[in-house]
Amino acid sequence: MLRLEGISVRLGDFRLRDISLHVRAGAYLTLLGPTGTGKTALLETIAGVHKPLSGRIHINGRDATHLAPEKRHLGIVYQDYALFPHLTVFQNIAFGLRLKGVPERKIKGAVDEMAGFLEIRPLLKRSPGRLSGGERQRVALARALVLEPYVLLLDEPLSALDRVTRSRIQKELKRIHTQLGVTIIHITHNLAEAFFLADHLAVMKDGCILQEGAPEEVCRRPADRSVAELVGIENLITAKVKDNRLVTVMGDVDSQKIFAGRDDLPERVCLTLPGWSIEIFPAGKPQDYIWQGNLSISSVYPMNDTGMVEVTLVHNGGESLKTYLSRREAKAMSPYLKTGTTVPVGFLGKGVHWVPQEVLI
């Protein structure tokens, strides 16, 4: 449905650099990255607001690189909704259809159908100023979707909403995607939001796409340190390979040997370990772990529904690793979860990913 080939854009001192991206019809793609990394600039380039210095944009099989925005047949929803304050909800939703010259009878039917789908029929006579944030978001979505766009572009659509409303609109976006089958590109810096909604994930930083793929695969096998950090992997261990084992190079290099289980690793590597792969009081089979030993608890942080525990990898000034326990687990282990206590710890092999050190560092 959408294909970007080598797109480069200059906006003042900022630049999008050689971006290639293929989005299949019916996909839900999230662009994940920190603020200022170029996500909105890329979305607006797709929409036709910015002209690329190089590269091509294909939409639904057609070269749209130089098409005017209104001829690209896209819908866009911004984080501030961009509703017309002097128009009613009905008039806002109908605005694009009227620009296209659709007969009024068909406009009324299309608006009524979309308002029913998004459960906003009681709001059609109100002005945007009399709506809540969640209601304004639904109106903005209705205005975009009523045009039956090839691709729906969402620019941080949930960032201005409170937690409860954000959760409700997330579920609504999931329903829209499932029932309408529309192709969606959704930009966000919120990791949980990206993983809840997306079936395809692209990680951006400094005007570049660093990695793309299924969310689970990107999280399990990050391409480099930046991707690992952006997808929430907090534990990175610098190591060197010796006799098919990994020996940590911080602190006492001979104190912690981790079995690699493979012979194709370079001399220096980094391990990425998601929090769930670090088990306190490991209860699995020995072959499930690449390393087991005793580590010292350096910190315990109570959280809302979980507790975060930091364990020190090397007793003498080593790096701390983070893992999380459910409230039930934390309660059962509470006698042992004290700063300075030594506890058995295991690293689950299925959670570990090896990356050459020169790529990660």
Image (cartoon, helix red, strand yellow):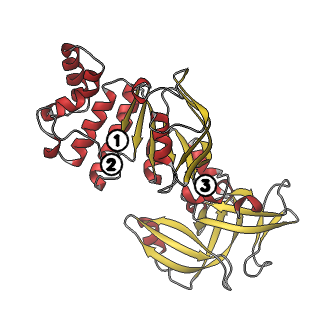
Residue at (55% x, 57% y) in the render:
230
Q: Nearer the viewer, residue 284 or 113?
A: 113
The amino acid type of the residue labelled 3 equals Val
Q: Nearer the viewer, mark 3 or mark 1?
A: 3
Residue at (64% x, 77% y) in the render:
295
Considering only vertical position in the picture, is 126 above or below 245?
above
The amino acid type of the residue labelled 2 equals Ser
Mark 3–mark 1 Cα distance, whole angstroms, equals: 26 Å
Name the element at disc 3: helix
| Mark sitting earlier along the chain (2/3) | 2
Picture disc at residue 61: none
The spot of residue 28 in percent (x, y) is: 47, 36
Q: Nearer the viewer, residue 253 or 72?
A: 72
Mark 2–mark 1 Cα distance, whole angstroms, equals: 6 Å
The amino acid type of the residue labelled 1 equals Lys
The spot of residue 173 in percent (x, y) is: 36, 38
Q: Quadrant of residue 58?
A: top right
